[in-house]
Image: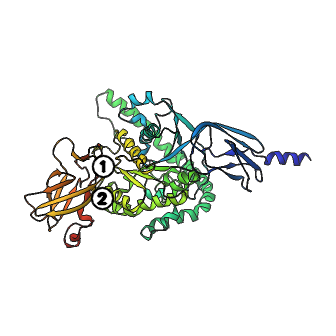
């Protein structure tokens, strides 16, 4: 009997929800609400929230999941979970939930932003809640998060949060007047293929190389995990042997060199040469498939950071990434940028498929000016607007710093994304995009450009229009004069009698100033991307 009681106590497990369901959480309004977590195998778990109740039995691995009916915005509320124990989660709000994802410019914290000193002390927004996904990559899709908690936005909590995400959430909260929850899922120096699931990559034959790598990692994962402890034990044995001989001799030689150097300096003599670094260090074993070093491998970030949150209903995503896909061997890469035309729409479609809530708004930042961002990467982002429905792009051609990968003026980025959300996600009739090239027609020596998203009208910010070049049938581009005429821009050059194509901001560091009257900048573009003469000598895209 005692052994049975002991075994019963050993098997008992408290009801434990996902960290996404913690004090201060924000739940998405207007959609059915799943709640999930861990408990003892076979344990019945009951969840109560705002008068609704749902129960489920944990499977043999302890996983359980219930679904509550859709809720209207409001709060704070309490949620009660009961099984072998009872747990109450408090201060829950129902409102709008957005994921803030991407690499270093999305990870860039409010502490480092231009106006942090003025903004942080005033950031008291108790109905704006912040959650950071701390999970790392993994060889296989994960269903659980290792930790994390919701916090209210305040001067004490906001400094380390994504600056772009904060400004987005701040403006959205003010505009919509309902609670806003932001889930930050970022990883510096990463590439889009790592943020895309293996299933998603498989849908594009052009991405087969990434599929092969991700599949191999997934297939080898059980063996790699099994062998890793033994490999590390072998490494430490070899390192100890090396350290007792070569390492010890080097340390002795280095100490003697330091002594001799001090003596030489005291006597005004030239110091001796330092001993050469030791060689033949035992090589480290390969990293674990869920280690930080694996972040460039296709699908691993999706598996570790995104897969665990795809059960959580959201309104949409804001995305700031492409830096890692704009270079190859640390240099600007047109090849990688061209691949992004397929890869980025693939990622968007993949995330929507995994969340299973339709084509939710996916709002992204076009890369700013930087010496290593070729114009083709901005073009790939621009083209995504036509390939992926329910998307919008915040142009930042006016905000970059040519020598700084991480420009610090983050507030306009978040503000522009919030405008896009208000229009795309919530149907507000507002200007949310800068001018986007629509069509070109010619009239003698004049190239006449038409645009979408002109808002209250086109303007040249700070003087005459700049950043335009024009080419004739030979495909050679020369600087051009550009003027706003009504809702169009007329481009000419004394060197070009018969215009064939126009480009705007077509450089790594564009110097441009075309805006609409709402203060939103035009995206760089080239008309020869789809011009009929493209096969007759103009540079191919």
Dot 2 crowding, Cα within 10 Å, few <14, some 14–19, many 20+: many
> Few, some or many C-alpha atoms within 10 Å of disc 1 (few <14, some 14-19, many ≥20)?
many
Question: To which residue does mark 2 refer?
Answer: 376
Q: Is residue 199 above or below residue 367?
A: below
Q: Are marks 2 and 1 in contact (CB under 8 Å)?
A: no
Q: How far apart are marks 2 and 1 (CA)?
A: 19 Å
In front of the other: 405 or 203? 203
Return the x and y of residue 170 as percentages of the image width and height: 44, 37
Q: In this view, does 191 lie to the left or right of 520?
A: right
In the rendered image, which quarter is residue 76 located in?
A: top right
Check disc 1 and report its element: helix, strand or loop. loop
Residue under the image location 54 percent in, 49 percent down = 239
**Foreground of the two, 241 or 393:** 393
**Residue 466 coordinates in the image, percent (x, y):** 18, 49
Most distant residue in the left direction:
494
Label 2 or label 1, whichever lies nearer to me, is: 1
- The answer to whether residue 498 is left or right of residue 510 is left
Residue at image point 49% right, 60% down: 350
**On-image quarter of the C terminus:** bottom left
Task: Please indicate, yes or no, whether residue 91 appears anywhere in the rendered image.
Answer: no
Q: Position of residue 535 (x, y in %)?
A: 23, 72
- The vertical placement of 319 against 261, above or below, is below
> In the rendering, at what x and y percent does residue 347 appear?
46, 59
The residue lying at 52 percent from left, 60 percent from top is 353
> Which secondary structure, mark 2?
helix
Towards the viewer: 319 or 11: 319
What residue is pinned by disc 1?
Answer: 434
Q: How many marks?
A: 2
Q: In this view, does 119 lie to the left or right of 5?
A: left
Is any atom of residue 178 visible in this view? yes
């Amino acid at each position: 009997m005692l052994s049975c009681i002991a075994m019963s106590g050993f098997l008992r497990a408290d009801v434990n929800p996902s960290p996404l369901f913690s004090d201060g959480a924000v739940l998405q309004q207007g959609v059915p609400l799943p709640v999930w977590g861990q408990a003892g195998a076979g344990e019945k778990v009951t969840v109560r929230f705002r008068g609704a109740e749902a129960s489920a039995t944990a499977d043999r691995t302890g996983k359980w999941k219930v679904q509550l009916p859709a809720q209207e915005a409001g709060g704070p509320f309490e949620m009660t979970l009961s099984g072998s124990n009872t747990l109450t989660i408090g201060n829950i709000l129902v409102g709008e939930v957005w994921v803030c994802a991407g690499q270093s410019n999305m990870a860039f914290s409010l502490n480092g932003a231009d106006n942090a000193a003025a903004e942080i002390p005033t950031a008291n927004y108790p109905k704006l809640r912040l959650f950071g996904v701390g999970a790392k990559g993994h060889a296989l899709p994960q269903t659980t998060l290792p930790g994390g908690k919701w916090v209210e936005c305040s001067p004490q909590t906001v400094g380390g949060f994504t600056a772009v995400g904060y400004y987005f959430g701040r403006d959205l909260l003010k505009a919509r007047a309902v609670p806003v929850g932001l889930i930050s899922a970022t990883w510096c120096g990463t590439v889009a293929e790592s943020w895309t699931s293996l299933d998603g990559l498989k849908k594009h034959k052009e991405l087969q190389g990434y599929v092969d790598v991700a599949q191999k990692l997934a297939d080898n994962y059980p063996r790699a995990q099994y062998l890793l402890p033994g490999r590390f034990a072998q490494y430490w044995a070899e390192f100890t042997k090396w350290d007792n001989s070569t390492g010890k001799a080097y340390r002795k030689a280095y100490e003697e060199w330091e002594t001799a150097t001090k003596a030489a300096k005291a006597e005004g003599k030239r110091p001796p040469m330092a001993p050469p670094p030791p060689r033949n260090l035992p090589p480290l074993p390969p990293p674990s498939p869920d280690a930080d070093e694996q972040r460039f491998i296709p699908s691993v970030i999706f598996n570790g950071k995104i897969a665990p949150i795809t059960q959580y209903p959201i309104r949409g995503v804001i995305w700031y990434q492409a830096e890692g896909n704009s270079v190859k061997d640390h240099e600007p890469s047109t090849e990688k940028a061209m691949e992004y035309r397929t890869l980025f729409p693939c990622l968007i479609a993949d995330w929507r498929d995994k969340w299973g809530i339709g084509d939710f708004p996916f709002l992204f930042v076009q890369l700013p000016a930087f010496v290593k961002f070729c114009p083709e990467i901005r073009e790939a982002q621009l083209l995504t607007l036509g390939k992926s429905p329910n998307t919008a792009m915040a142009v930042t051609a006016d905000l970059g710093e040519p020598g700084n990968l991480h420009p610090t003026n983050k507030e306009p980025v978040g503000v522009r994304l919030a405008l896009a959300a208000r229009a795309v996600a919530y149907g507000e009739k507002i200007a949310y995009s800068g001018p986007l090239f629509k069509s070109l027609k010619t009239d003698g020596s004049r190239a006449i450009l038409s645009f979408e998203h002109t808002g209250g009208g086109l303007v040249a910010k700070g003087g005459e229009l700049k950043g335009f070049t024009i080419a004739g049938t030979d495909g050679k581009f020369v600087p051009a004069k550009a003027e706003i005429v009504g809702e169009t821009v007329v481009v000419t050059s004394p060197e070009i009698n018969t215009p064939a194509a126009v480009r705007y901001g077509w450089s790594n560091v564009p110097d441009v100033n075309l805006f609409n009257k709402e203060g939103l900048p035009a995206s760089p573009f080239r008309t020869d991307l789809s011009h009929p003469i493209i096969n007759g000598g103009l540079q191919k895209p």
